[in-house]
Image (cartoon, rainbow, N blue to C red):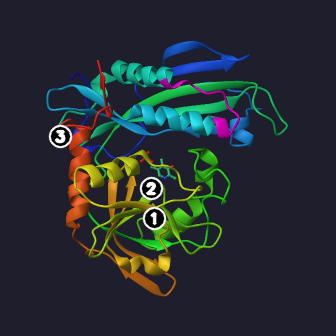
Amino acid sequence: MSVNIDWDQLGFAYMELPYRWRAYWKDGEWYKEGLEEGKKFLISEGSTSLHYGQEAFEGLKAYRTKTGQIQLFRVDQNAQRLVNSAKRLLMPEYPVEKFIEAVKKTVQANADYVPPYGSGASLYIRPLLIGVGDNIGVSPAPEYIFTVFCMPVGPYYRNGLAPMPFVTSKYDRAAPFGTGASKVGGNYGGSLLPGQHAHAEGYGDVVYLDPATHTKVEEIGSANFYGIEKETNKFITPKSPSILPSITKYSLLYLAKERLGLEVEEGDVYVDELDRFAEAGAMGTAAVISPISRIDHGDKTFYFYSETEVGPITQCLYNELVGIQYGDIEAPEGWIFPVE
Ligand SMILES: *Cc1c(COP(=O)(O)O)cnc(C)c1O
């Protein structure tokens, strides 16, 4: 490895790497697809991504295994989710096979920046699809850019999993039949303020309730929620059309059932009934699992496993998934994509 990076000091910060994939769309087709150098590009001031939020993104990671191989985790799922987001915002699809190839080529070109096995660090990959070109009315853009860039990031938890408190929000991140299930920038602009309030009060992030009735748990900041039911050890995660379908969530749901032998359920999680859970956590690519110590809701507080320690099922689920991502544990078929 020739690059001069202190892998143990990496946080989650932007870093300009030498190469990124870019593809351009106009008149019904993608053209000029390939690797480019330089983080900047010029777009029209009339771009719909700037005015009307016509943009979607993805987030995934590349991992280096014990043998030095680089591998991607379920990149086909990210590709398909971007297709779904594109459809919702009337953007042209970047086909699944092209997406996988674009991510592989980008990682390969920046391979020196994929952190070594054992550092706990990984290469964070950000695919992005934006509406560009001259436009002013509320209508789909005449042109689009698809890009994939990446950077090394440190482990979310440097000293092992640590539980954090969360608080319910009076704000919503998405409308009942809005864009909550699409990974689009518009959902995030509105989440900055509630997020800032929560952080200022010492919480990990906010708990978003279902936007129609504010009685059910939907998401934890930008991660999905699960609870482990007392007595039954059932793995329960909310189901709703305004939740972003987390790939980490569906992976953990599968592992809970197939590897830990737990019962699993996607269903309603009423905030007033949170004390049915012995353990709870938030799921997403960045942290895999953020264990939840407690949730404050108005004048009520719901406590989970411990304020300081991680529950045994949460720890098992985390170890299993991270073991698969770094190649130490055999993956279910089709989950791992080697980068040659
Ligand atoms: C990206 C995202 C998640 C997590 O999805 P993963 O595929 O597991 O990374 C959860 N909630 C929201 C709102 C998101 O944008």
The residue tagged 3 is 329
- In this rendering, does residue 270 appear at all? yes
Q: CA distance from mark 1 to mark 3?
A: 31 Å
Indicate left or right for 284 with 122 as reference.
right
Magenta span contains residue 92? yes
Q: Amino acid at mark 1?
A: Asp
Eye-nearest disc, 3 or 2? 3
Q: Mark 2 falls on what kind of element?
A: strand
Q: Which residues are magenta?
A: 87-96
Q: CA distance from mark 2 to mark 1?
A: 10 Å
The residue tagged 1 is 205
Label 1, residues with CA under 10 Å away: few <14, some 14-19, many ≥20: many
Q: Image point 53% across, 71% down: which residue? A: 216
Q: Is residue 340 above or below residue 58?
A: above
Q: Image point 81% across, 31% down: which residue? A: 135
Q: Mark 1 falls on what kind of element?
A: loop
Q: CA distance from mark 3 to mark 2?
A: 24 Å
